[in-house]
Image (cartoon, coloured by chain):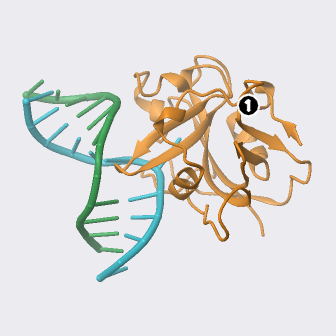
Chain colours: A orange, B cyan, C green
Amino acid sequence: MQRLERDFFARPTLLVARDLVGKILVLGDKMARISETEAYVGEDDPACHAARGRTPCTEVLYGEAGYAYVYMIYGMYTCLNIVTERKDYPASVFLRAAEPLAGFPARTDLSGPGKLTRAFGIDRTFNKLDLCSPDSSFYICDDKLSPQRVTALERVGITAGCERLWRFKLQN
DNA sequence: ACCCCGATCGTA
DNA sequence: ACGATCGGGGTT
């Protein structure tokens, strides 16, 4: 079990999104295998929250890779992203689904971005946390069982830019 | 100050 | 198909 370092995240977002499928999200004693991700890439991506430029809300997207971007959606769910690429280039990988490995009640359902964050207890206070800090209990690791088959699909839940095959899903 | 609406989910 | 629920951002 090896923690992913910052150089893993500081790469082209499509590569990071694909490579994150099969990796393990860890928060305290909770662990889950990431099974679905999406890439949101730069101000030219109409679905990226930075599409209308830099605001206090999107500030973290412009920072260093490996930080959490967490925001509230529809008044009742939070969404978790990991910032990618380089400073001043806004991009991230959105975590859409995972499979529970440890620390969850039996049959916990992590098959959706809102379910995932709720089960992990990830709220807006997690925004701007560094998943690459050595003393963080919130990080992503690689158990080397990882790369199984990954398929590229259209992104969902958005109205613009949904034709791009920027969603990556673990094949069962 | 107001208005709109969104990277969702559960129920109908 | 639709309602719940809320905060950021753009507009007035």
| Count of labels in the image | 1
Q: Quadrant of the N terminus of chain A?
A: top right
Q: Quadrant of residue A41?
A: top right
Residue ranking furthest to the right = A144
- Chain letter of the residue carrying label 1: A
Question: Whole-percent x and y of residue A109?
Answer: 60, 66
Tell me if A11 is positioned left or right of B7 in this view.
Answer: right
Residue found at x 71% / y 55%: A103
Residue that numbered label 1 is attached to: A9
Question: Whole-percent x and y of residue A160?
Answer: 44, 48
Tell me if A81 is positioned left or right of C1 in this view.
Answer: right
Where A138 sits versus C12, above or below?
below
Crowding at mark 1 (Cα within 10 Å: few <14, some 14-19, many 20+): many
Element type at marker 1?
helix
Taking the image as drawn, is residue A142 in sight?
A: yes
Residue found at x 55% / y 30%: A42
| Amino acid residing under circle 1 | Phe
Q: Quadrant of residue C6?
A: top left
Where A113 sits versus A63, above or below?
below
Question: Whole-percent x and y of residue A89?
Answer: 59, 22
| Foreground pick, A159 / A99 | A99
Q: Quadrant of the C terminus of chain A?
A: bottom right
| Foreground pick, A122 / A39 | A122
Residue found at x 86% / y 58%: A148
Q: Quadrant of residue A106?
A: bottom right
Taking the image as drawn, is residue A45 in sight?
A: no
